[in-house]
Amino acid sequence: MTQLSTETLPFDVTTTEAVHLRAGGVSLVVDIAHGAMPSIVHWGSDLGPLSDLELRELIVATAPRRDNSVDVPVRVGVVPEASSGWLGAPGLQGHRSDGTAWSPKFSETEHEVQGATLISRGHDDQAGLDLTVELELTASGLLRARADVVNAGESDYFVDRLVVTLPVAPVAREILDQTGRWAKERIPQRRDITAGAHLRESRRGRTGADAATVLIAGERGFSFQNGEVWGLHVGWSGNHVSYVERHNNGLTLLGGGELLLPGEVALGAGEQYSTPWVYGAHGIGLDEQAQRFHSYLRSRKQHPSSVRPVTLNVWEAVYFDHRLDTLLELAQRASDVGIERYVLDDGWFRHRRRDNAGLGDWFVDEDVWPDGLAPLVDRVRELGMQFGLWFEPEMVNLDSDLARAHPDWILQTGGRLPPEARTQQVLNVAIPEAYEYLLDRISRLVDEYSIDYIKWDHNRDLIEPGAAQRGGAAGTHEQTHAVYQLLRELKRRHPDLEIESCSSGGARVDLGILEVTDRVWASDCIDPLERQHIQRWTAQLLPPELVGCHISGPRSHTTSRTHDLSFRATTALFGHFGVEWNIAEASERERAELAEWILLHKRFRHLIHTGRVVRPDVPDDEVTVSGVIAADGSEALFDIAMLGRPASWPPSAVRLPGLDPTRQYRVMAIGPDAPTAVDGATPAWQRPDGIVLSGRVLGRVGIQIPPLKPEHAALAHLVAV
C-alpha cells in the first residue's frame, strides 16, 4: 500500500494493491491490484492517514456487488473496459480496418507514483494496444486525469472515443451544469440524477456559449455553501463531451474527454493519441469546489503575476469608424481617468470597412492609416498606457486577398464550402503554409508596434470542418492543436505578450485555452444586469483576474437597457477591470465619477485578484451577493446587488461566510456614491462609522441587505480591527 501527500518525494511502486493520494483536504484512493488498470475507490473528503489494513478493507467494502450480469464483481476503471463485464459506455472505443481490436483488455500493468501523480500503463498484446492513465492530485485538491493510447500493432487503429471517468458517492442525487447562448453565457440548469446518462456534447469546434463548463453532481439541495459536490471540466477548446452516468447497480460516474468526429484520429504503427486533461473538483458547497480550480490556476508558472492593467477597448466607442483624431482624443480621455491599457479593436486592417470583408488580410490598411498605426501607438505610449490590438486569425472572409489567393486553406469537405456564419469561413490553421502566414503576420506587427496585448477573437462555429490536406477528412482535432501551437509559439517569441481568448464573447472559456492565453472575455454582453449572472457562474471555474469585466456605456450595446454608472462599475469591479464606452462623449461629471471608480478598483485589485471568492446563499432570486476575502482573513469586499423587486420588503439579512470567526471586523459602505445619510431605511453598516462585528456573527447572522432600487448595487468593505 502506498499513501502520499503532495509533500512526499517521488516514489516508484509496482507491486502495491492501492495508492492513497492526499492534498488540499481531498483523498484519492486508487485500486491497482490484480494486474488491472486503475480503479478509483474513493474521491472526496480527506480520509486522513490509513493503515494498509484499512486500505484493504476500504477496497473490499466498496467493491461493486454482483448483479444479474456476470459472475464476478464488475471492476470499473478510470477508462472503463467492456472486457471487465462493464455494460456502460466504454472508455476506449476504436477498431482496426478489419473490425478487430474493438474490445481490448489491458493487463501486464505497471504503476508508478511520482510525487502526487499516479501513472498506470497497460498492454493488450492481442489488440496491439498500449494504454496509459495519469491521475494527479494538485496541492489545492483538484484532480487532473488523462489517458493515451498507443498503436503497438502494424495496421492502422481508428480511435472513435477515449474518455476518463470519475466515480462519485451514492449521496449525489442532483446535477447542475450550465448552458447559454451568445451574450447570455453560463446560465445554470439543474435536474435530478436518474438512471441512464445526462450527456453534454459540443460539436461546435470550440467550447461553446452553451458549454456545460463544470458538470456537477451533488447531494440534494446543495448550494454555494452547503452540500457535498463533485464536478468535472474538460480542458479542451474543440469538440468535447461530458456526462453523468448512473447504472442500476447504483454506481454513478462523471466522464469526459474530446469528442472525435468519424475518422478524425487514425493511428499508424507506433502513433499515439492523448486525451485533453479532464479536471475533477470535490467540495463541500460550490464555493469550496470553485476554490480548488482557482487555487490551481493561481499556482501555475504562467499565471499572470503582474498587476492587471485597467483596460479601454474602443469597439463600442467607434466600431469601424477609425479616425485618428477621434482615437487620439479617446486615448487622452483614457489617460485622464487612469486607464492603463488601450486596445484598438476590429477595423484596422485592409479592406475592413464593414464586417463582411478583409478577415485574413493582416496588414494595416493604408487608406485609413497612411502612416501606419504609429501615430496612435506612439501617443498611447506617451500617455503612459500599454497598447493592444484585435485579431481574428482563425477566420477568413471570402472577400479578402487571402481567400482569393488560397481558397484551399478554408476548412471544407465534399467539394463544397460550409454555410457561412457572419459572412466568415474558417481558416485551416493545421496547413503548414497557413500556420506560417499567421505566425509571420502577427509576429511582425507585434514587433513593429511593440504590442503588449492581443484580443484574439473567434466568431463562428466550425461546420463541416474538413481538412484539405487530408482529403476533406474531419479536421477539428488537428485545428485545435494547431491553434494551441500557434499561440504557444507567439508567446515564446514574445514572452511579455498577453493574449485574451474572445470567441463571440464567452464561447471559448476552458482550461485548455487558458494554458496558452492570459484571460478570457466572459461575454459580449456587458449590461451589468446580465453580467451579474454571467460573472457569478464563470467563477465556478475561473478566478476574477482571468475574466475581462468592463464598464459599458449608459445604454447597453446588446440589450438597450440603461443603468447608472454605479451599477455598471460595481459589477465590473470584480474581475479584470476595464471600460468599453466612448468616454470622449461622456460628461465631465461622468468622467470624474469614472476616475473615482478606477481609483477604487486600483485600491482593491490586489484583494480581488488574490482573494478567495465567496458567493453567500441568498434565498431571494432578486438579490445576489458576491465577494472576495483576503487569504489571511484581514479584509473582504462584498457586492450586494438588487436585480429586481423582492416579494418581501425590506430585504432580510445576508450571511457573510468565510471570515475568521475569532476576529472583529469593521463593516462600512464604500464607493463614489456610497450612501451616508442616516434615516430609518439605511442599514447601520451604511452609516458613516459603519459597524463592528465578529466574523462568527457575520457568518451566522450577517448584515442587512439595503433597500436598493432594482438594478442597483452597494459595496461593503470589511477590515479586521
Image (cartoon, rainbow, N blue to C red):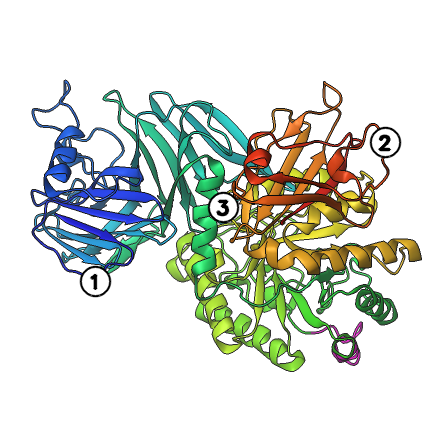
Q: Nearer the viewer, mark 1 or mark 2?
A: 2
Foreground disc of the pair 2, 3: 2
For marks 2 and 3, the one nearer the N-term is 3
First reached walking from the N terminus: tag 3 or tag 1:
1
Residue 255, by quadrant, is top left
- On screen, residue 330 versus residue 234, left or right, reads right
**Left-right relation of 655 to 514:** right
In the image, residue 365 lies in the stretch drawn in magenta: yes
| Magenta stretch, main secondary structure class | loop
Among all residues in the image, which is located at the extreme right? Answer: 588
Q: Is residue 665 visible?
A: yes
Q: Which amino acid type is marked by label 1?
A: Pro
Residue carrying label 2:
679
Q: Is residue 69 above or below residue 595?
A: above
Specify whether 654 is left or right of 79. right
User: What's under tag 3, amino acid-wise?
Assistant: Leu
Helix, strand, or loop for circle 2?
Answer: loop
Q: Position of residue 494 (x, y in %)?
A: 53, 76
Residue under the image location 57 percent in, 31 percent down: 617
- What residue is pinned by disc 1? 10
| Mark 1 vs mark 2, CA separation in Å | 64 Å
Tell me where the magenta segment starts and ends, as one range: 364-379
> Eyeballing the image, is 499 above or below 688?
below
Secondary structure state at the residue bearing disc 1: loop
Q: Position of residue 664 (x, y in %)?
A: 60, 44
Horizontal and vertical percent position of residue 468? 44, 59
Amino acid type shown at disc 2? Asp
Does any portion of residue 479 appear in the rendered image? no
Distance, label 3 to label 1, CA atoms, is: 29 Å
Look at mark 3 in the image and give the residue it sits on. 541
